[in-house]
Amino acid sequence: MAQIDRIPALDFLGIGGIGMSSLARWALARGIPVSGYDKTPSDLTEALEHEGATMRYSDSLEAWNVPQSAWVIYTPAIPPDHPQLLAAQAEGRVVLKRAELLGQIANAGQSLAVAGTHGKTTTSAMLAWILSQDRPIQAFLGGIASNFNSNCLPGPADLSVVEADEFDRSFLQLHPSAAVVTSTDADHLDIYGEADSVIEGFREFASQVKGPLFAGPGCAELEGAELYGRPGDRYSYRDVRMVDGLQHFILVVDGQDVATQAGLPGLHNVENAVAATALAHSVGMPAAAIGEAIASFRGVARRFDRRASAAGRHYIDDYAHHPTELTRLIEALRGMHPGQKIALLFQPHLYSRTRDFAAGFAQSLRGADYVGILPIYAARERAMAGVDSAMLAARIPGAQLVSYDRGAEWLVSQPATVVVTVGAGDIDRLVPHVERLILAQA
């Protein structure tokens, strides 16, 4: 196997993805030449170019001018017939999936992995922030952490924090020193086929953890894991109360009580803090220092991201793309803004997920007062007969189909004091427009 301490250069196919860009930043920080392809420019690709990467936005072989020695790293979102991927394979280059490179880096030293259907990005970002207050670390995150303004802490360091993604069974490339699994809800059924296979995937991941394994309250099926978050657990919480929009609570750390606060609303974010605490404490971080770091954690872009407030209206953007995540988001909004009307613009992500969880999406979205649904974001999939946004809207009383081009105007026109954009596709491109419209009302 090619060795990571001998990488001559890296070429990323799909470099604008959040996981790929994290690895690109790690390489750039080490002086490794980085190039990459993506379909279209984005804030991330522009940032990478500014940091020293060479970018291209054509998949033609003519545009592919990288050294023969460069390793080619690709994301599962890249189609198997991508011309540059096919050429790299035909030429006998070192070709690795993103998860394989991440595994080589993380497995080379001590690593702490955060897995789970929900909460892994916020939890891993929080864990990275906690540990960075105590020692040098590397971190590879699935979102832009506000405290770092990045999705990567490049080190060098012997300890890595890694977000362990269950999609495409990527997390099976990891053999972490310790890990946490926040949840094992069914998702990615286009990969796993059925809910039981999802759980089997998490069990296989758990079997690869070398040391302590912690699991959320709903993960009792992971044999050998230490559960957290329940009364009486070694790592738990109590006395949650809302003060000036912040959740204050007592963090229970192996019998010690630590007063702290979560800057992000929703009980699930208190549970995320407990998950991060368990891993940080397992590598020797003192309880009091953990509590202090949690209180100064500022969150992750697109995770209950407060974007604008004006004239008594509040705009939040969120990445939720699973029914459980939507339910938690709306519950958090109700807790933050009791008695106020909520307008929510949702972009379904993937035809298969919309099909598999249509009933759950409908149930979750009924929690908002005004619901607009954009066309499905297909990502890597082709359209499926009978699966579209109209099918979903028909299950939700009062829901409206909204075109992408009119999404921002529709949202701001609703008679609600809380407006929210939600989804994992390209709905984030509407955020600046919604912000302008909200601020213009001031």
Image (spheres, rainbow, N blue to C red):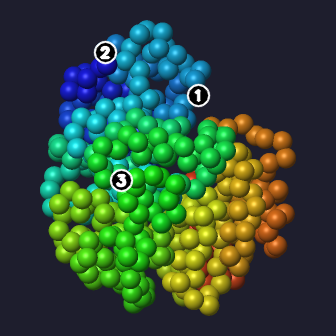
Q: Is residue 189 left or right of residue 18?
A: right
Q: Secondary structure at mark 2?
A: loop
Q: Kindly identify the residue that appears in the image at 19 percent across and 75 percent down.
A: 288
Q: Kindly identify the residue that appears in the image at 31 percent across and 15 percent down.
A: 69
- The residue furthest top is 91
The one of 68 and 181 positioned closer to us in this rendering:
181
Counting residues from the start of the chain, the first of labels 3 and 1 encountered is 1
Q: Secondary structure at mark 3?
A: strand
- The residue tagged 1 is 79
Q: Kindly identify the residue that appears in the image at 41 percent across and 21 percent down.
A: 95
Q: State yes or no: discs 2 and 1 in contact (Cβ < 8 Å).
A: no
From this view, report whether residue 398 is shown above or below residue 300.
below
Q: Is residue 269 left or right of residue 437?
A: left
- The residue tagged 2 is 69
Q: Kindly identify the residue that appears in the image at 40 percent across and 55 percent down.
A: 225
Counting residues from the start of the chain, the first of labels 3 and 2 encountered is 2
Q: Quadrant of the N terminus?
A: top left
Q: State yes or no: discs 3 and 1 in contact (Cβ < 8 Å).
A: no
Identity of the amino acid at label 2? Ser
The one of 174 and 132 positioned closer to us in this rendering:
174
Counting residues from the start of the chain, the first of labels 2 and 1 encountered is 2
Residue 213 badge: 3
Q: Position of residue 47 (x, y in %)?
A: 36, 46
Label 3 to label 2: alpha-carbon separation:
39 Å
Q: Is residue 52 visible?
A: no
Identity of the amino acid at label 3? Leu
Q: Is residue 143 left or right of residue 400?
A: left
From this view, report whether residue 217 is shown above or below residue 339.
above
